[in-house]
Amino acid sequence: MQIKDIIKKVKQIEIRTKKKSEATLMGQYHSAFKGQGMTFSEVRPYQFGDEIRRIDWNKTARFREPFVKVMEEERELTMMLLVDISASMDYGTQTQLKREFVAEIAASVGFSAAGNNDKVGLILFADKVYKVIPPRKGRKHILAIISTILSADYVQAESKIEKAFEYMMTVFKKKSLIYMFSDFEDSYDLKMLRVAARKHQLLGLRIYDQKDNEIPDVGYALFTDAETGRQIWANTSNARWRYQFAEQQKQKVKTLTEDFESSSAGFININTGEDYAKFLYQYFRKR
């Protein structure tokens, strides 16, 4: 994309997602993800109904009337967006490319996090980690992340989600919220997935185009793997071949769902033509 096209698209995404994140997602996001604990706020006189264990005995003895400690939730969290930039993500046959759809979802969850004063960071990966934007707060930072996702050079390489997890585990010691965006077309290290899910709060989002799951009857066609460059000819008029392809994709999604759930991680399977806010809202409600 040209710079002017990226700026235009970033502005469009901001307009579309700000209202959606504020009206639909922000409240559920806040409820779903509590803070890292409780921190001391102030001491005030005891009121009927206060917990006895909150009494400040030193101040109570000094003033000869009961005082209690007021604790507040330590809200600040860190959200990391892990985005697959292998070439298969730079593809789309409907209203958006996968990368554009990812940028829009990232904007929605990013603005929700910013509205709750949380930090947001970005890791772009494929066969290795290509770019990292450290977590920060604020609207301008979210816009910079959206622009980076849209303007990234998507690489012809097989994605390895474990590389992103390894980097995350090495650099970010504190428990964080991880949103991993990928089409999960390649194999992955299940052990590393489980380790990452134990350390952090993980949600995998499989972003797919309708043609990823079902191939139409177009006769003999040459197919090229966007990530490896491998090519094969196939007779798409063969109904059995099309059925087997669709079944393989269904099994892949079933395995992905089971792997994430057995790792105590969330998983959402989203078509680029679907309303992602509905899926996120349901996920937050479950949390």
Image (cartoon, rainbow, N blue to C red):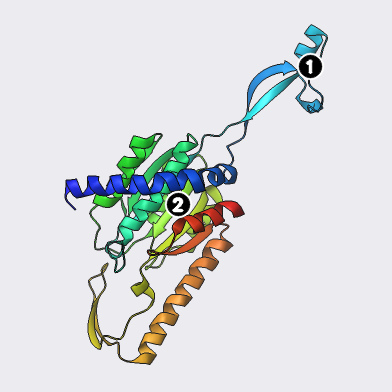
x then y, percent, for residue 17 = 40, 48
Q: Which residue is mark 1?
A: 57
In the displayed structure image, the side of residue 123 where residue 203 appears, left or right: right
x then y, percent, for residue 130 = 29, 50
Task: Name the quadrant containing residue 210.
Answer: bottom left
Q: Residue at x 53, y 45 (%)?
A: 29
Task: Name the quadrant containing residue 55.
Answer: top right
Vertical position of residue 25 compared to residue 205: above or below: above
Q: Residues within 10 Å of mark 2 (few under 14, many from 20)?
A: many
The mark found on residue 153 in the picture is none
x then y, percent, for residue 234 = 27, 86
Per the model, the C-alpha gap separating discs 2 and 1 is 44 Å
Vertical position of residue 67 compared to residue 208: above or below: above
Q: Is residue 131 visible?
A: no
Query: Mark 1 or mark 2, which is nearer the start of the sequence?
Result: 1
Q: Which residue is mark 2?
A: 179
Badge 1 marks a residue whose secondary structure is helix
Q: Amino acid at mark 1?
A: Trp
